[in-house]
Amino acid sequence: MTSRIAIIKTGTTHPRLHSIFGDFDNWFRESVSHAHFTTFEVADGNKPPELRDYDGFIVTGSPAMVTDNAPWSENLKPWLRSVQQYGKPLLAVCYGHQLLAEALGGKAGWHPQGREIGTVSINLTDAGKQDPLLGGLAPIFTAQVTHAQSALTLPPGATLLAYNDYEPHQAYRIGNNIWSVQFHPEFSVDIMRGYVFEAAEKLLAAGMPVRKLLATLDHADANRHLVQRFVDLCQ
């Protein structure tokens, strides 16, 4: 059986990366071997999908900031609450992770330590080790990240699944059907490298050692197969 997955696309990547690698929805499509994907470009003003028409949902990252309170972003919050009530699987990534937190009663905002970017180590909590989605990862795994805002406060009832020294809320679960990750399971190491180059001037201005950062980029444990695992859970 082929899962029907709706991708809720909350923006688009840098133009140069787009010309080389495609866009956010392409990266999720390339992460799995079997699924039927439909993209909904909500940042362009399109409505999110009807819940009854799909087996699962993925909310992408975005160059936007949740605290901008863009109308399309605010309009997505009631839909996210409806997914929780409907009970179908949802995976929220980066911007989606932060927006979901706000939609369900948490809070998103600027991280007090600035941007986290690169290939980083992340720890599973005890709940994360038993989780149907993240439990297949090692207790300490690597993932690709790039974000300046975070889910500062998790929604009531959220189960924390993963964290690291920089980001205490790398992943959480709501109930048994909604997963949310700050990291990017859809990023390849080449895409991650492209993000570092695109942000290089800002990183250097902030005093970050860009050359050292580039040298530490690597294939991440969470790449690709985590998206496949989510699609499998949608069947």
Image (cartoon, grey):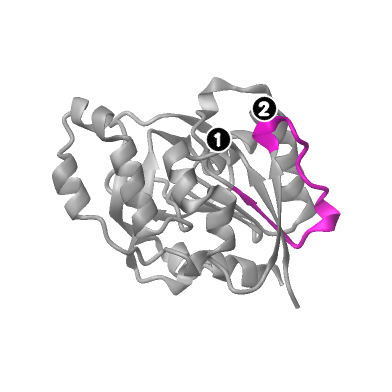
Quarter occupied by residue 189:
bottom left
Q: Secondary structure at mark 2?
A: helix
Question: Where residue 170 sits in the image (x, y, percent)?
Answer: 42, 49
Residue 168 location, quadrant: top left
Q: Which residue is drawn at the image coordinates 58% and 33% (left, top)? A: 102
Residue 54 among those drawn in magenta: yes
Q: Quadrant of residue 148?
A: top left
Q: Is residue 85 left or right of residue 164?
A: right
Whether residue 155 appears in this view of the structure is no
Name the image quarter holding the C terminus.
bottom right
Q: Which residue is mark 1?
A: 106
Q: Is residue 158 left or right of residue 145?
A: right
- Residue at the (20%, 47%) spot, across then down: 213
In this view, the residue in front, 146 or 15, is: 15
What quarter of the picture does the N terminus occupy? bottom right
Give the magenta-colored segment's residue range. 42-59
Q: What percent of the width, then of the height, locates residue 161?
A: 46, 57
Disc 2 packing (10 Å; few <14; some 14–19; many ≥20)? some
Image disc number at residue 74? 2
Which numbered disc, 2 or 1, marks the residue that appears first in the sequence? 2
Residue 3, numbered label: none
Marks 2/1: CA distance? 14 Å
Instruction: Inspect the image, locate mark 1, and give the three-letter code of the amino acid beneath it.
Output: Gly
Say whether residue 40 is left or right of residue 100.
Answer: right
Res 29 seen here: yes
